Image (cartoon, rainbow, N blue to C red):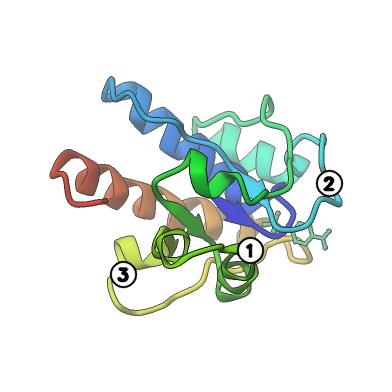
Amino acid sequence: MVCLGNICRSPIADGLMMKKVTENKLDIRVDSAGTIGMHAGNAPDPRMCQTAKSFGTPIDHLRSRKFIVEDFDRFDVIFAMDKSNLSNILKLARSEKDKEKVRLILNMSHPGKDLEVPDPYYGGEQGFIEVYNLLDKATDAILEKIKNNELI
Ligand code: 4NP
């Protein structure tokens, strides 16, 4: 799960996916990163932590890190939160195989629409709730695809 800072959108995508993978006893590695390293080592934004906790998916334990080229080797699928993240990740791709791994996450719940998860960083609480709800639906759709062997 990849966004810009790895403190708002991708940590909650990570937390939601991890929760669903664990609940379904799936042996799948879930992680998140940001395309900038500015917040590396930091916990998620307190507003995202608060919203996540209030909806039953605590993410306080997560720490920000920068996306690195080796992530193309460590993961089968890489989900970008918006088109800017997608483009930044694709710039690091070394091959067509790397590029094929990268997808816009909302195309899981809204196929073919190329929708973006809005960046809540500069807005109010409602933005964090909207991000949570969008990513809850997207991770449900990912889980279904995993179960139906349709993701990779
Ligand atoms: P995120 O949100 O990409 O969802 O983690 C942001 C976090 C930090 C900044 C921008 C967006 N920033 O400019 O520091």
Image spot of residue 85 (x, y percent): 62, 67
Question: At label 3, which amino acid type do we have?
Answer: His
Q: Which quadrant does ligand 1 occupy?
A: bottom right
Question: At label 2, which amino acid type do we have?
Answer: His
Examine the rendering and report whether any part of residue 53 can be seen: yes
Q: Is mark 2 within 8 Å of ligand 1?
A: yes
Is residue 100 shown above or below 149? below
Q: Residues within 10 Å of mark 1 (few under 14, many from 20)?
A: some
Q: Earlier in the sequence, mark 2 or mark 1?
A: 2
Which residue is label 3 attached to? 110
- Could you tell me how far apart the alpha carbons at marks 3 and 2 are, in whole angstroms? 30 Å
**Left or right: residue 33 compared with residue 112:** right
Which residue is label 2 attached to? 39
**Left or right: residue 13 compared with residue 103:** right
Q: Residues within 10 Å of mark 3 (few under 14, many from 20)?
A: few
Image spot of residue 57 (x, y percent): 51, 31
> Which secondary structure, mark 1?
helix
Q: Earlier in the sequence, mark 1 or mark 3?
A: 1
Name the residue: 37% across, 30% down.
Answer: 28
- Could you tell me how far apart the alpha carbons at marks 2 and 1 are, in whole angstroms? 20 Å
Question: At label 1, which amino acid type do we have?
Answer: Leu
Is residue 91 shown above or below 35? below
Is residue 43 shown above or below 109? above
Residue 94, quarter of the rendered image: bottom right
> Which secondary structure, mark 3?
loop
> Which secondary structure, mark 2?
loop
For discs 2 and 1, the disc positioned in front in the rendered view: 1
Residue 92: assigned label = 1
In depth, the one of 139 and 124 nearer the eye is: 139
